[in-house]
Amino acid sequence: MKKTGIFAVILALSLVLTGCMTGGMIPPPETLADGTPWNTEWVNMAGRVGVERPEGFQLLTTNGTLEDMTIHYATWVRGEETEVDKDTYIYEGQVYLMTELCDSEASAQATVEEWYGQFGGALTLTDRETVTLEGQEFELLSYDCTDSHFDRGITAIWRYGDMVLVADIACADTLELDLRQTMVDFLAGFHYA
């Protein structure tokens, strides 16, 4: 099983949140909200969002549910793999995406606010910026890692209807990567049903 500290923090935070529905793997729709046909090459996130592979990264894992909650995640990796300890590996660069279905839009908004409130810990916020892509607003939080296998990263937390989405890109300084541009390009590859 491959995991990292940042993803563990994201997952741990998700498990303490309330207002989420139970359920299993949700199949993708036939079409998006705008009528565009679903592309089978996209990663299916809870049957609501199709996600393109981030440029230069390879899909490592996807999972449909965790802890009896409707939580979906995907991880893409880039660069050299390093074993941190038994069954724990990191790469020079990793992209994480987690979605969580909540029982209402209000519950999803409260969850987004709770995520923002818990952002920090081993991370030092270095920049905060709001960007809009195809009508969807994202707040980008850039950070330096102080107690992690990574050196820096960027996170976006947002809501789409009753779904909360968290995207995180973390990397070691050995990987030359424009985190902001990589995140903007990644977010531009989201397709909403």
Image: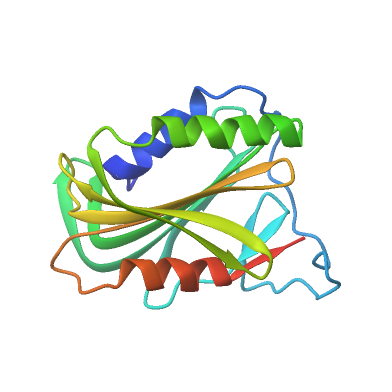
Rendered position, 184 above or below 151: below
Is 59 on the left or on the right of 143, as rendered?
right
The x and y percentages for residue 90 are: 24, 53
* Residue at x 57% of width, y 71% of height: 189
Q: Is there any visible trace of residue 7 in the rendered image?
A: yes
Is 190 on the left or on the right of 167, as rendered?
right
Count numbered badges in the picture: 0
The x and y percentages for residue 185 are: 48, 74
Please tell me which residue lies in front, 151 or 70.
151
Please tell me which residue lies in front, 150 or 37.
150
Rendered position, 41 above or below 85: below
* Residue at x 58% of width, y 48% of height: 158
* Residue at x 83% of width, y 66% of height: 30
Q: Is there any visible trace of residue 66 in the rendered image?
A: no
Rendered position, 111 above or below 152: above
User: In which quadrant will I find the C terminus?
Assistant: bottom right
* Residue at x 86% of width, y 72% of height: 35
User: In which quadrant will I find the N terminus?
Assistant: top left
The x and y percentages for residue 47 are: 73, 53
Is 87 on the left or on the right of 94, as rendered?
left
Please tell me which residue lies in front, 63 or 191.
191
Is 131 on the left or on the right of 124, as rendered?
right
Which of the colour schemes (rainbow, by chain, secondary structure, one colour) is used? rainbow
The x and y percentages for residue 173 are: 15, 64
